[in-house]
Amino acid sequence: MTTQILIELIAVLTAVRDDTPQVMTIDHGRSLPSGPLENAHRSLQAGVRAWVERQTGHPIGHVEQLYTFADHGRMLTTEQVRTIAISYLALTRSHAGETGWRDWYDYFPWENAKSDTGRTCRAHIERRLCQWVAGMDNPATRIAQWQRCVSLFAIGDMAVWDDELVLQRYELLYEAGLVPESGCAAADAVPGQPMHHDHRRILATGMARLRAKIRYRPVVFELMPEEFTLLHLQRVMESLSGIHIHKQNFRRLITQQQLVEETGAMEENTGGRPARLFRFCGEVRQARQFTGTKIPLAVP
Amino acid sequence: MTTQILIELIAVLTAVRDDTPQVMTIDHGRSLPSGPLENAHRSLQAGVRAWVERQTGHPIGHVEQLYTFADHGRMLTTEQVRTIAISYLALTRSHAGETGWRDWYDYFPWENAKSDTGRTCRAHIERRLCQWVAGMDNPATRIAQWQRCVSLFAIGDMAVWDDELVLQRYELLYEAGLVPESGCAAADAVPGQPMHHDHRRILATGMARLRAKIRYRPVVFELMPEEFTLLHLQRVMESLSGIHIHKQNFRRLITQQQLVEETGAMEENTGGRPARLFRFCGEVRQARQFTGTKIPLAVP
DNA sequence: GTGACTTATGCTCAATATGAGCATAAAGGG
DNA sequence: CCCTTTATGCTCATATTGAGCATAAGTCAC
């Protein structure tokens, strides 16, 4: 008798509200929205788009496949049923405050270097990882694992924080027993809300993908309103990447790449000098959608 | 009654032989190796690894998921059966000339700028695309599509060839009716061997992924022998990316990144001055496997 | 052996890109 | 009017990159 197979589509639906990246959840923030692949869906992408739009009522700008999971350990109801989960990253422009939206950094506080909680969380993790490697018997593995901690969490002066390694950091914390997953609560976990099954890991995958992608494809604009100031754009990129950006260099890069054009109007409520409003002008030369949107990094 | 679902694993298994990237095929070069997901496989990755290693007898160094397809148009036997194809990129060190290995560029001749056939093929494509857009009624779409041709195939002096856009170029050719797919033979197609189903598209996905990845992760070394000269490494990277690399700059970049170390031995059969042999020293500081392997581009 | 040819390897130089900061402009609020 | 805030233009040192020159050290033909 053959094993029955269930196909599950899981979405990391992301929007930015008040310069804070958010993710759509269900089940009181414990799960990502997911649904079975229906026979009517012509393609996987169409399936995700259909039920996400139905569920949230918002048009989705960008949909991209993340990863397909099928581990036997994962949601195995019985030996006769195997679940295959195909995860997607979806971006939507904004939302009017419906329920279900949660901050990215509720789940990954250490990924946000711009907040105080983020920094204290990192300091906390640093101490815990230090204890973790100290308890290892084999000196070789201890050194290797410590090296891994150092480069992933930028411990010490030399190392630089790589914002794209969200998943690798999460997996390190998981191995170190500092985050609970799939029900088995870690005795004394690091800050950050857990999720059911492997959904927190899938969220990490989506965050990493988006952080990587905004560097070389103009996808940020899928999350921006029609018109925006350069500071607004900068704040969104900072909140997504979790790092600080040098203001003048950011403007230089954005303007010289000719991805945006002035609308002519001004934003008056800046709290200081009024700012020019811009719009994404990618539609005009949509064909060159391959050119990048480089962002200048900087340590705070 | 529920639709039955079949899970198919498809591998883009790549090796480099005589400085030529090759892909493992079956069915006289018409298909990529594929197999059903078995119940015994603990995970998808393990499944791919298991049957690829069994099939080729070679250990696989690197396996990475590419994409999951489930279009209804795709291999739909009956309405009751839906096939989900999960594709993987797998790298292996070498092969002793077993059957089934084919050159990448048999399928994508235009992707190889280093050969004469590649250059003539590009010239041919350029003319055909020119005809294609000339036949369009709507001037707006004609301009937009021509712009797309220009940037994808680097037509004219301004544009630069982006080696990572393998899939986008293939899809453009497909839209233009210049490549046959899934049986329906294009009347007068561009050079390049077709494959069954969407396998050629999957190969394009794998090529694009590998070309992108060798730029920022040290995966080339999965395709290299234990010891190699810098020219050998350069030739492998050139053959994978299909572009020319400035020799001195390449050495500068590789050596200063400290990814390789001298073995002390020399390669004598260089045809010129003997060359130092190097080995990948990533294992020593495996933890920093995130640092990149930048390659210096250059137009020939 | 000599000269032509091949590949290896070290080094320079100009053009760009990047990181950091100074300075000024233009708004609001006491 | 002074202070704070944000916007915006500009400079400067440094790092990275693209391109090429020059020399070293082999092979091969004669």
Image (cartoon, coloured by chain):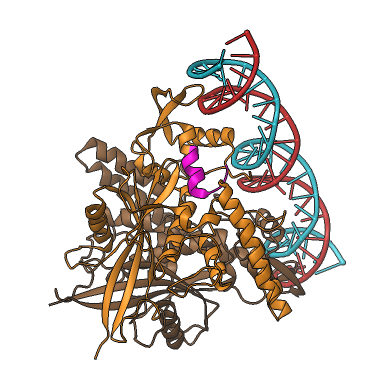
Chain colours: A orange, B brown, C cyan, D red
Measuring from the top left, give residue B244's x and y in whole percent: 56, 56
Up-down: is A171 above or below C23? below
Residue lying at 65% horizontally and 61% vertically, measured from the top left: A126
Side (left or right) of A28 relative to B182? right
Q: Is residue A156 left or right of residue A77?
A: right
Residue that appears at 33% across and 38% down: A283
Horizontal placement of A223 versus A172: left or right? Answer: left
Depth check, front residue: B196 or A206: A206
Q: Is residue A64 above or below residue B69?
A: above
Q: Can residue B153 be seen at all in this image of the molecule?
A: no
Q: Chief secondary structure of the magenta span?
A: helix
How far across and down, in percent of the image, does residue B240 sit?
A: 51, 64
User: Which quadrant does the N terminus of chain B fall into?
Assistant: bottom left
Q: Where does the image place residue B193, in percent across and percent down from the top left? A: 34, 68
Give the camera-side residue of A244 and D4: D4
Residue C3: % across, % down: 78, 58
Q: Write down the region rendered in magenta.
A: A234-244
Q: Is residue B86 above or below residue B140?
A: below
Determine which quarter of the picture holds residue A287.
top left
- Given residues B148 and A231, the one toward you in this image is A231
Give the farthest residue toward the left.
B1
